[in-house]
Amino acid sequence: MNFLTQTLSVAAKDLRSEFRTKESFNAAASFAIVILLLFSFAVDPTSDQIREMSGGLLWIVYSFSAALILNRSFARELPNDCLDALIASPVSGAALFLGKALASFVLILLIEALCLPVFGIFYDLNWATQPAWLALVVLLATWGMTVIGTMFSALTVNLRLREIMLPMLVYPMLIPTLMAAMQLTTLLIAGQAIAGDDFVWLRLLIGVDIIFTALAVALIEVVLVG
Amino acid sequence: MQAVTVGRLWKYFGDYAALRDVDFTIAPGSCTALLGRNGAGKTTLLRILAGLSVPSKGEVTLHGKPPRDGDARRQIGIIGHGIAIYDELSATENLLLFARLYALADPRAAARHWLEKTGLDHVANSLVREFSRGMRQRLAIARAFLHSPTLLLLDEPFTSLDDRAIALLQQLLNEAIAQGSTVVMSTHQLREALELATGVALLHRGKLAHAGPRTPEMLADTSYLYRTYGDAS
Amino acid sequence: MRNKILYLLGIAGVAWLARNLYIIFLGLPDEAAQGAIYRIMYFHVPSWWTCFAAYFVSGVAGVMYLVKKNQDYDALAVASVEVGVAFTLIGLATGSIWARIIWGIWWTWDARLTWALITCLVYAGYLMLRRAVDEPTTRARFAAVFGAFAFTTVAITWKSIEWWRTQHPGPVISFRTGGGNMDPAMENMLFSNWGAVGLIAIVLIAVRMRQEQHLRLIEALRRQVHTL
């Protein structure tokens, strides 16, 4: 109960201060739209080609804009040494981590929800033929990105060149998650159901989420307290 | 039970020992001034007491519990180098956040009480970003005292505070000590610290050079301690 | 004394490698299907085994550091990663050369090739992270945490990328089917060369560990001087 209150308090705090300034949200959202636009120059936007690579394009947009959100996650605590006050409080490292991850998760999902219809309009795609499955894939893959991103945000928060380090460390780690998400999203946007061999990708997404969440929760105290 | 026990504490950064075999206790209800030159290990020791850092060797207990224990942390109030409040939140929101993290029974009442006590009730709903320096400092003091800690760990509390904040902090510390709370503070400003202090601990190059009661000579001549024990190692 | 043992082991490794080279080039016949180029396998396959072993050691050393807080485990972890990355690059280069001759292209986006590249990037991140942290204890802690994530990702990627795409020749030696489909002389040479390559890798790791220990000592002395 206490754990939950603490987690939600941290998440609410992050969301509230983000929505007051909208610093990273606006940047991430407009960045996402810009990349969506750039794709129209890379491939013929009216051809069927775009349908075959829709999942790939979408997740490149998502992962790029997510990096902007995740960069701010622990950096938000820097200005007045707020992180020390949080660590010294009775909040466990796990509650602190999950609270911050939850806040970034919500922000990234909002940006994704914003991009999806824009993507559909720009490239004349009907993305909503399998809404429930698509939602599931997006939720699972976004959580995977968020967990790794938040963990590395904590790891790099005090480093020189933080903004450069984070994407450099995070993207190679995200490859299994992004591979599965791209594969499944392409299927779903093409209107096919997930069947047979494709479930292996769904299992991969779930497995990666569980493994990395467990690792992060187990190791966050080591990162924060030394 | 002692408020703080530090038993044969070592802290290494790589192969460099920042604290060497530090060993002392602090009685409940006392006020200890932690003295020493820059790099003597004052901040390192306070961070270990606050649970922000862990010992490499040795043992630290606060009221019999390790510093990273949840109950021990509920008892600690810290003021560090930063003010540790959020610029994008209002004064009330800042205090409410910490009240919830400390699982206080009535977060709103606690927040209101401390805003009044620090003279910030008229700006309770303004963003901290818009506060003057002095107001931010008082809010930081309110944040540290919010959960009625019984062990206060202050790192250079009087440096960079304005006069009103210094007076407020001294008043609150006196009240806390009168109620039986324990205070440990590191400081350069010997006079302000020594007036409050009942005991002193002097660190010299990571070693405890002297620990004992504060004597009248120290007040009369503030560099007395450094001259007497400064090069004891 | 310890240095002398290291040098002796290093010399032994190099001598072993020289002997193997002599046999590989002059003693063994060409392979029926591939001709002379198959010989690259004697370096390609052992470098893969070595790099995998090095990453594994580094992961274990990282966890041991978190448990024991002994800086020597950290030195072992970073030394293993560096040697691992070096052997991954050797594996990539030899694989590319082989592919150019047999398949006609340098880079095939084959599963294991892609995996190796990802692994290189992950561990390049490890080395960059270390470089960005100044304080040795924090560096060791962060590196160990990163190492745990890195090894997990590398293991998962190994499997998942195989589902994605594969055209790599099957394992030349399979422990599961209990024996290879290779000529025994060739198979023996493969193991023998792994021994030589592995010995050299161990010596390199040990030398890097010594360097790390000395670096730590220098850093501590420097801090000591600053406080005076």
Image: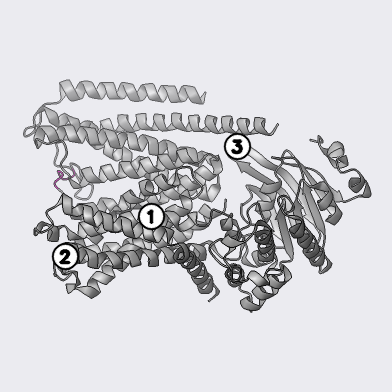
Q: Which residues are magenta?
A: C167-171
**Do the residues under discs 1 and 3 have CB atoms within 8 angstroms?**
no
Measured in 3D between alpha carbons, the distance from the residue under mark 1 to the one under mark 2, in whole angstroms, is: 28 Å
Mark 1, residue position: A68
**Image quarter for residue B93?**
bottom right
Disc number placed over residue B208 in the picture, else none: none
Q: How is the image coloured?
A: one colour
Label 1 with label 2: CB-CB less than 8 Å: no
Instruction: Confirm whether the magenta stretch covers residue A6.
Output: no
Camera-side residue: A145 or C6?
Answer: A145
The image position of residue B26, as x and y in percent, is 79, 56
Q: Residue at x 37, y 21 (%)?
A: C11
The percent position of residue C108, horizontal first and vertical second, equals: 15, 42
How far apart are the alpha carbons under marks 1 and 3?
A: 37 Å
In front of the other: B126 or C13: B126
Horizontal and vertical percent for residue A113?
Answer: 29, 68
Q: Residue at x 11, y 54 (%)?
A: A44
In this view, the mark in front (1 or 3): 1
Co-location on one chain, circles 1 and 3: no
- Residue bearing the label numbered 2: A187
SS for dot 3: loop
Crowd band around label 3 with a 10 angstrom C-alpha radius: few (<14), some (14–19), many (20+):
some
Amino acid carrying label 1: it is Leu
Magenta span: helix, strand or loop, mainly?
loop
Q: Is residue C170 magenta?
A: yes
Label 3 is found on which chain of the structure? B
